[in-house]
Amino acid sequence: MHPVNEYFQRLTRRHLLGRAATGLGAAALGSLLGAESQTAPHFAPKAKRVIYLFQSGGPSQMELFDYKPRLVDKYKTELPESIRMGQRLTGMSATQSTFPVVPARFQFAQHGQNGAWVSELLPHIAQITDKIAIVKSMFTEAINHDPAVTFLQTGSQIAGRPSIGSWMVYGLGAEAKNLPGFVVMISPGQGGSGQPLYDRLWGSGFLPTRYQGVKFRSVGDPVLYLRDPEGFSREDRRAYLDTLGELNQAKAAELGDPEIATRIAQYEMAFQMQSSVPELVDLSKEPAAVVDSYGPDARKAGTFAYNCLMARRLAERGVRFIQLYHRDWDHHGGLQDGLPKRCKETDQPAAALVRDLEQRGMLDDTLVLWGGEFGRTVYCQGRLTEKDYGRDHHPRCFTMWMAGGGVKPGLILGETDDYSYNITADPVHVHDLQATIMHLMGVDHTRLTYRFAGRYFRLTDVHGNVAKKLLA
Amino acid sequence: MNRFLLAVLGAGVLLAQPVEFNRDIRPILSDRCFACHGPDAGNRKSLLRLDSELEAKKDLRNGRFGVVPGDPAKSGIYQRVTSANNALRMPPQYAGHAALPARDIDVLKRWIEQGAPWQAHWSFVAPNRPVSHNSVDGFVRARLEREGLKQNAPARPETLLRRVYLDLTGLPPTPAEVDSFLRDPASYENVVDKLLASDAHAERMALRWLDAARYADTNGYQSDGVRDMWRWRDWVIDAFRANMPFDKFTVEQIAGDLLPNATLQQKIATGFHRNHRTNAEGGIVEEEFRVEYVADRVETTSTVWLGLTMGCTRCHDHKYDPLRQRDFYSMFAFYNNVPERGLVYNFGNDEPMIKAPTPTMATRLAALDASLDDTKKTWADWAPKLAVEQKKWEKKARKAKTDWAVPQGLVYSNLSTELKFEGKNGFDAGDKAKFNYMTPYSFSVWIKPESGTGAILSRMEDYWEGSGYGLYLKNGNVHFVATLRYTDISMRLETTEKVRLGQWQHIAFTYDGNRKTKGIRIWIDGKPANIKSTFDELTYPFSPKVPFMIGSGGGLRFHGAIRDVRVYDRALTEEEALSTFVTEPLAAVAAMPDAKRSEPQKAKLHLAFLDLAMNAKARAALAARDKAQAERDKYYATIPTVMVMQEGPKRQAYILKRGAYDAHGEPVEAATPAFLPPMKPDWPKNRLGLAYWLVDRANPLTARVQVNRTWQLFFGQGLVKTVEDFGSQGEWPVHLDLLDWLAVEFMDRGWDQRALEKLIVMSDTYRQSSAAPPDSWQRDPENRLFARGPRVRLAAPFVRDQALAASGLLVNKIGGPSVKPYQPAGLWQELSGGGGYKEDTGEGLYRRSLYTYWKRTVAPPMMVNFDAPTREGCIVRETRTNTPLQALNLMNDVAFLEAARKIGERMMREGGPDAASRVAFGWRLVLARAPKSVEKVSLLRVYDRFLARFKHDLASSEAYLKQGESPRDPSLDPAELAAASSVASLILNLDEAVTKD
């Protein structure tokens, strides 16, 4: 980078981006840096924001979208080596003595004009198949949760890189006036277990920490330390901040350090968040019909339904990257009982979110994604009985769906073989997905870089191609 | 950076000086050319290489040259960067690269005109003592003069005192310390010496080292289980307390275990390279993660000591520096022989590890060992007497009416003469023998199998890969399984001996509760069986949900008969286990002539004698030994362990293609990077040799890197800002001569860390005022030239430590297990479920932040908010941001509200009679200086406002004062205290409070 640019960027990062939270930083940065700027967009974006409904644990593709009727005849037969082709398995099933094929034990039907096959477990998604694009040919490189989720979120299996949301806010700046640019919400599956999640999944890695995702919590205050202490009123806080500002101002005049001005601004931003966040979670003005459309759980904080509704409200307020995590899709065993429950928790809210955005005219510039970190194996893991079966992790194919934000509605992309084991058409690698998300946001994934430890890093490392077929 | 300064500080400087390769040219080539014309052979786009003088100036083909000294027009690089033809222009437009700016082109041209003199990269040549100056200030002033600038006036004494306290200890001075200094500002050097020698200084220095060492209290992957590395952490504190020279500090941490007659402390030191994250997620490929750990050690070593980004070379040759992929895996080979596993235990330390008693613990243990030895001896002394007694007793015992069997710990027995099994139903013994993976237990059972395969005893789900434990026969061998998930979280073994069909045989089984197959022993008919461990990864607890079954379990069924089942909730001793094989009644054994008795019979008789007939004194002696043993064992179990480095059998290292763990390329042997001075021939080719090499004077990097990192502690950034990268992509130091001078000085003074720090804080450069007119900030926003004193926001831990210290809450206690101060409820559960964070009460709430429990996947939120490294990997660069979350944190976190309340109490008790003196006192507690009159006016105004409001609303005062666990001084008026506390909170939130001025 040109040294003068580097200077301005550094100056900017410390002294201007401090105000980016008020929407000023990105623009200022862009104009200061000129053509070689790290800031995007690089071209006209289709999507202004992303809502990523991450299904943590790895939902089974062949019980939900990847319909494989011929598996019924293969029940309990051994997975052929011609299909497995020496594929590495997790330590959990690598020493399993047999690999019996088990077909989905749920009914499928075709829906919409595109005739998409959707499982009976997803009746609401089934009604919006013409609005979404179903990608059956996602694949990843990791076979275990931690590396796989980290890979999807940061482009690397080993933790330490910035998450996709951090990259987006770093590149595009914040739009929201008084909310963070990158918000994360988590809902546990009602099974109560599930894979752990980590702050680093929305961490900023080596990017400045101001780009990290802010987790809105379901217990206590949505934002840590948001609430003033008991006995301390808003008027008290105002008086406190006025004096604090006065004293800081005097210090700034004495010392000349521009960092002090930034701190004054951040305290004001904090004060604003103390009202904007409670306003965000206050559903009293939300029409009952809208809330109800997200399903019976929508009023219960901490559920996926509630979080979907919050996601829409965050999107309305200009939050750039909204990430929901729903846990407990890891059905090594107990799939027959557990999967329908996860579907029940997520099907209606996810469909309602797409419809709600559409009705508000926001779907066009909001990209919605749904999917997990990998798929599941066609063979049974653990005990296979009439009432129960399980599936191990499967990196070679899994299904995601996307909606809005420049994605071709009604598209069904990709095919897998009869065992839902290998992709036979239109593979989409994790890095391709990342490149595509960035492309829809107006960002060239090869050009959004950050210099750290002697080299330029990017989300997609040195890989990734935009999945052009997905674009509207 | 340097070029930027020139740009900002005046282009005239540049024109006045000759072009210098390292300063002016190398950054351009490195940044814009090396990726394709540099060290990475795999990525080189043409014959031209610009990372080597020889290559750049050689005849490429047909008289074409990259660089022709003195002649830009004939120099390929100049032609290409200035080409108007986009197809030819470099860097290539077709690859999306922008053209070089005119300034860079101009510098290139003039450099070629001046003869294109080359220089080796500055950091790859050992530093020589510069002769131009002999003090920090000498170098800094000379540079400022060149730029037409002057050093600032000295900082006010109280500002300087707070600065040096915070820098050297992370804690503010007390008002008394400030007063004493104000009376005698000339005592500065004494103050510095006192601070350098303080324990607080050792803690402060340890903190940054923990960041570099990626120290934490959990494993870091997936469910992020606990580990215990605090003994290593305390070693670091001790090392700084003793001012251990940095070379020794290095050698002991890299290879303390390999030093001759390594002490316990030297072994603990090697925990440095076991601090990396480890994975306990079931299902991972072990080798993939083992390789990851070794690679982490290479990358951390290269960052911490060499300032090199070796991580780049894990997959390919370095694109900018003369590091090859081979160098990475040669370094890898040093760390490849640790007898460790990729899949680790999730509830504590994993091998290799050692017991690491503190000195106090060692003393106590030695005392317990001594008293155990005493009791053992007393007991042993009884042996001859008891032998005589036993002989006598045996005569009586011939008439014994009742039999005897080991009674201690018997939790279940089924003494049926014969339970018959026909391969159908087992015998349901109910909710008995509920053992888990870490509980010891033993079985004794007689079997008469008709088939070589079947279940003997189990609490195991009824299918082969179920969860629980089971003692089986499989193809005639005795087989044992204890498992949560059969395929990867289980312990499995079998005997090589087979049982005979159709005959009664006895099986004794003992397990010591240490979740390893080596803790299991089996005897068949009183003879120890040979055990083959087939799987040894029982890393998680299991909880058998099914009843204790005889003759079934795990999908297997017994064919034949079983009798005399005994279950113990402890591991029987060998003598006891043998005795269980004896079917003859006690009387019969006693009646046998001694020579005819088998070993098991002897065991039974002896044990029965001890249990039934030994004299009271001997019994007391035995009980005393058992008690001493139990006490010793109990205490020993509480002694912490620490994971350490060890050398196991050599594992061959390979170049891993694309860095993939399973893509072995050429084999490589342990070696240091080829472009740096080699290891001396008499050093061992192992970690110890590597450690010697790191701190050898010929090594051009280590001293510079450590000096630079030390500089960063005081000025917020290094003389080379890229503290982690001294390669050609790193920053060219603003003050190379100063850096080199400090590095040489450091080594000449025997790598004396405190002396180095003193050199810096005694300088006028450090002692300047940080107040400067706006043009100073504009000209040099980051203070790279040091025309003013450092002004840097406090690191996260010190923001909290300062509040604790000012409030009087701080508990000064060094070392020990990590503590759990206040944290908003639910953070852990939300991410990973489970029991969650259990806050300490009492002193654990008020220890220095260095001791705060660090769960990697959910790092302490206040630390994260204030930019602490997350401890995922090695981080040496300090970063600082300024966010609204920090504001909320400081205003509303109970830790800071409680501190404010305690400061409020101090204001009222110690601050004088009136509001004005009280607010001034609170101010001084945090900021060291007295408030100016305008500041006092603001403070008083807001204090009066709060007072009026709290007086009016006593309920609010009471509520507001409820923050935190520490008791409130009941003698103080609640409204006044609430007002004072509010002002104290405000003071803690001042920019000046979180900043060192």
Image: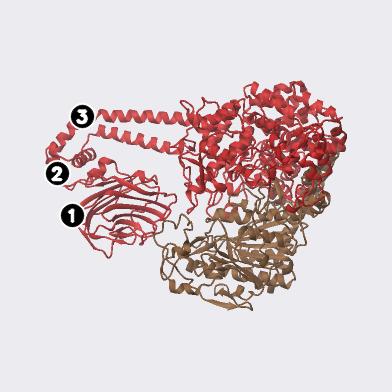
Colour in which chain A is shown?
A: brown
Q: Label 2 marks which chain's residue?
A: B
- The quarter in which the C terminus of chain B is drawn is top right
- Pointer 1 chain: B
SS at circle 1? loop
Question: Which chain does the residue under circle 3 lie in?
Answer: B
Horizontal side of residue B782 vs B625, given as left or right:
right
**Of B14 and B649, the residue lying toward us:** B14
**Rendered image: mark on residue B587:** 2
Name the residue located 38 percent from the left edge and 47 percent from the top edge: B439
| Label 2 secondary element | helix
- Image position, residue A338 (x, y; %): 50, 66
Front position in the image: B604 or B939 = B604
In the rendered structure, which disc, 1 or 2, sits on the residue that comes first in sequence? 1
**Can you identify the residue that label 3 sits on?**
B385
Q: How many residues crowd around disc 2 within 10 Å: few (fewer than 14), some, or many (20 or more)?
A: many
Looking at the picture, does residue B693 appear above or below residue A178? above
Q: CA distance from mark 1 to mark 2?
A: 25 Å
Q: Quadrant of the N terminus of chain B?
A: top right
Please state the horizontal and vertical placement of residue A280, each as a whole percent of the image.
72, 62
Q: Colour of chain B?
A: red
Give x and y (percent) for residue B559. 24, 61
Residue at figure coordinates x 49%, y 37% from the top left? B642
Q: Which mark is residue B769?
A: none
Classed neighbour count for the residue bearing mark 1: other residues with Cα under 10 Å, few (<14), some (14–19), many (≥20): some
Of marks 1 and 3, which one's residue comes earlier in the chain? 3
Amino acid on which disc 1 is placed: Gln
Label 3, residues with CA under 10 Å away: few <14, some 14-19, many ≥20: few
